Image: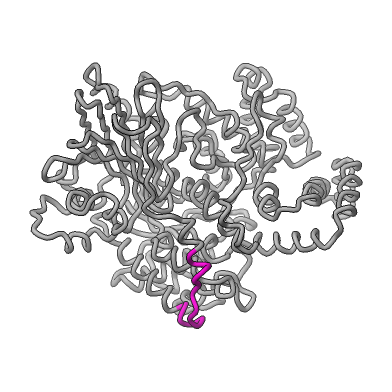
């Protein structure tokens, strides 16, 4: 795992870029504390800066940027090629200098070409590749989007790299906030690809590589080596037709192989364990591959509503892992909140980023690599919101549109504050914010498109963001590709999550939180063989016997009894609503100061103050949108004050 940054000036460099490259690399030193290197060619205008976290081949032969044997190609590579030993066996008559997967990748590109090499590679990665013969820059990213890669033209330079913070140190970079993207961020809590928070800076689409040279258009030429759209459509048109037991057997084989490959490392390795289905399945299969106890890690909370550590401990004891747990206090989390945005390239408002960072920080004290159980919900129909959405959609659509319009108008006529007060009476003083929920439900009544119903309302944090952000048009990037019109509603929800929520929220959270502590994370369920097989399974294979993620459960129950697993899921969040009124009040109040909001000029200060007052007075629950605003405010402050 590493980080890289660089720039390309087609007309050549006017001076030695060493100082700029060093600053760009130093800005991402957390992604690679073990080694650093720069390389450039003044005449061709290409410049690379690299920071290395040594995982495979800890010697100097793994130093980057790295050159191919013929010197034709130079690469700066972030990630892992899990099947690189298999690729080496297929590459004949090579005199290897070391054991790194970067060297394997370079030799493969030189022998097979880039596209064939990418198609044959299994891994998580992003990289910049310079061809010294054709004077072409290529940027490439893994199939799912596990590793980040930003790029964009600034003046006469194409900037690229693993983290936006490095761009700040290039003299031509102008950090102009994209206000339309900001409105979308406030809705979702994350920034949806291919955009970034900055104007004219983008994220490379997963499963693609893009080339730039004097002979290509300025925006580059994009090539697709793995298409999620084609994989999903092909899988639905040609679904798995074996028995349920055969599905479980094939999934276990694929997942076991992926885990075996991902356990390859020259440094200590472990796994996150929450005690849930996904992480317990990964740890069970890891332990089956190991003669020694696997190191597992979890964090616990003293608040019972948020604590799952006891369940993780029970699973660990049953499997015989070397388990480490850390109970964190509210103060531990509060100490992290003002600093968490520093490790994120962009504003990010999934509050589970905080416990994720804490467990990664704890794991880093023992290991350098940790496997994660992420993606089980998205691939195997695991979210309870899927069936809740279908139920709500079916009930609403059973009513005539005329009646739904009357219902919406009637609800909107009644103040949500009044309904909230009624809710207090009905629940004997418990704040359930019934008015907020009913009013949000009213917004659903007139929607006739299921995709819009799911994505804009059941996933969105706040839907009036155009009223909050000054001088911004409404963010209306909401549609799936038109070829997905043939999907049923269950398949559409999973496709929406696979296209956006998984890569732009879940994977961003895991990568940045872990790399903020210089810990590499690996996600076995995102091995593309596992992903392709998961897409091919009809919903009836994923949800069975009143259980979601049915095939994963069948694998898990070969190792762990159901009694240790079957329980309501608590999640990995923090009590943002209450803490904004209590221990986080001063921090939040400072960031939302009216004069500060006016000076910065992004938000309507009156709207912000209204939201803040209603929330702190306990009248409304605006915790989601306020958290997103606060994370932007903190990120913006940190970005402007970082060196």
Camera-nearest residue between 560 and 133: 133
Quadrant position of the C terminus in the picture: top left
> Is residue 313 visible from the viewing direction of this image?
no
Q: Residue 166's image quarter?
A: top left
Main SS category, magenta section: helix
Left or right: 505 as drawn, with respect to 434 = left
Residue 202 image point, x, y percent? 45, 35
Camera-nearest residue between 65 and 315: 65
Q: Residue 465's image quarter?
A: top right
> Is residue 399 visible from the viewing direction of this image?
yes
Tally the numbered discs: 0
Q: Residue at x 72, y 30 (%)?
A: 467
Q: Is residue 95 above or below residue 321?
A: above
Residue 51 image point, x, y percent? 28, 37
Tell me where the magenta segment starts and ends, as one range: 234-248
Q: Report if residue 199 lies within the magenta region.
A: no
Q: Report if residue 239 lies within the magenta region.
A: yes
Residue 145 image point, x, y percent? 43, 49
Q: Residue at x 30, y 28 (%)?
A: 8
Residue 133 image point, x, y percent? 17, 37
Camera-nearest residue between 503 and 56: 503
Q: Is residue 184 above or below residue 548?
A: above
Left or right: 444 as drawn, with respect to 549 = right
Q: How is the image coloured?
A: one colour
């Amino acid at each position: 795992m590493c980080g890289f940054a660089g720039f390309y000036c087609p007309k050549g460099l006017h001076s030695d870029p060493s100082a700029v490259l060093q600053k760009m690399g130093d800005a991402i030193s957390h992604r690679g504390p073990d080694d650093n290197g720069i390389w450039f060619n003044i005449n061709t205008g290409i410049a690379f800066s690299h920071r290395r976290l040594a995982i495979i081949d800890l010697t100097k032969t793994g130093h980057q940027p790295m050159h191919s044997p013929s010197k034709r190609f130079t690469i700066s590579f972030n990630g892992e090629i899990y099947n690189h030993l298999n690729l080496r066996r297929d590459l004949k008559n090579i005199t290897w200098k070391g054991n790194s997967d970067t060297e394997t990748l370079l030799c493969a590109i030189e022998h097979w070409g880039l596209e064939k090499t990418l198609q044959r590679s299994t891994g998580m990665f992003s990289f910049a590749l310079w061809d010294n013969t054709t004077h072409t820059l290529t940027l490439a990213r893994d199939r799912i989007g596990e590793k980040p890669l930003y790029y964009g033209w600034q003046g006469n330079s194409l900037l690229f790299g693993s983290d936006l913070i490095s761009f700040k140190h290039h003299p031509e970079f102008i950090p102009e906030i994209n206000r339309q993207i900001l409105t979308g961020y406030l809705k979702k809590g994350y920034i949806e690809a291919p955009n970034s928070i900055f104007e004219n800076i983008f994220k490379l689409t997963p499963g693609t590589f893009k080339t730039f040279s004097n002979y290509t258009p300025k925006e580059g030429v994009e090539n697709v080596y793995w298409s999620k759209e084609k994989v999903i459509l092909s899988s639905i048109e040609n679904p798995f037709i074996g028995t349920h037991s055969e599905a479980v057997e094939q999934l276990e084989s694929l997942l076991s192989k992926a885990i075996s490959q991902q356990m390859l490392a020259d440094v200590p390795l472990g796994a996150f364990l929450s005690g849930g289905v996904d992480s317990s399945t990964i740890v069970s299969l890891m332990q089956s591959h190991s003669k020694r106890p696997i190191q597992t890690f979890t964090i616990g909370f003293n608040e019972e509503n948020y604590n799952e550590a006891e369940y993780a401990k029970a699973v660990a004891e049953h499997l015989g892992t070397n388990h480490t747990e850390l109970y964190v206090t509210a103060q531990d989390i509060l100490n992290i909140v003002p600093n968490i945005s520093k490790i994120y390239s962009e504003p990010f408002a999934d509050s589970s980023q905080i416990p994720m960072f804490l467990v990664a920080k704890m794991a880093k004290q023992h290991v350098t690599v940790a496997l994660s159980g992420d993606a089980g919900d998205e691939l195997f129909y695991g979210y309870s919101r899927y069936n809740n959405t279908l139920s709500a959609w079916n009930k609403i659509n059973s009513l005539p549109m005329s009646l739904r319009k009357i219902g919406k108008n009637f609800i909107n006529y009644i103040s949500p504050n009044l309904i909230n007060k009624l809710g207090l009476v009905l629940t004997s003083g418990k704040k359930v914010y019934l008015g907020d929920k009913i009013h949000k439900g009213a917004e659903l009544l007139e929607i006739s498109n299921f995709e819009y119903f799911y994505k804009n309302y059941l996933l969105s944090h706040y839907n009036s963001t155009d009223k909050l952000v000054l001088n911004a048009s409404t963010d209306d990037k909401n549609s799936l590709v038109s070829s997905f019109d043939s999907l049923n509603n269950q398949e559409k929800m999973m496709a929406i999550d696979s296209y956006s929520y998984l890569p732009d929220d879940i994977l961003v959270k895991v990568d940045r939180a872990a790399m903020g502590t210089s810990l590499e994370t690996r996600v076995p369920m995102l091995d593309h063989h596992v992903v392709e097989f998961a897409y091919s399974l009809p919903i009836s294979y994923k949800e069975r016997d009143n259980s979601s993620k049915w095939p994963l459960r069948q694998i898990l129950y070969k190792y762990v009894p159901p009694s240790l697993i079957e329980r309501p899921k608590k999640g990995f969040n923090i009590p943002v609503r209450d803490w904004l009124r209590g221990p986080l009040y001063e921090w939040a109040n400072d960031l939302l100061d009216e004069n500060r909001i006016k000076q910065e000029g992004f938000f309507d200060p009156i709207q912000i103050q209204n939201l803040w007052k209603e929330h702190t007075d306990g009248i409304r629950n605006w915790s989601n949108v306020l958290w997103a605003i606060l994370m932007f405010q903190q990120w913006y402050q940190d970005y402007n004050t970082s060196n």
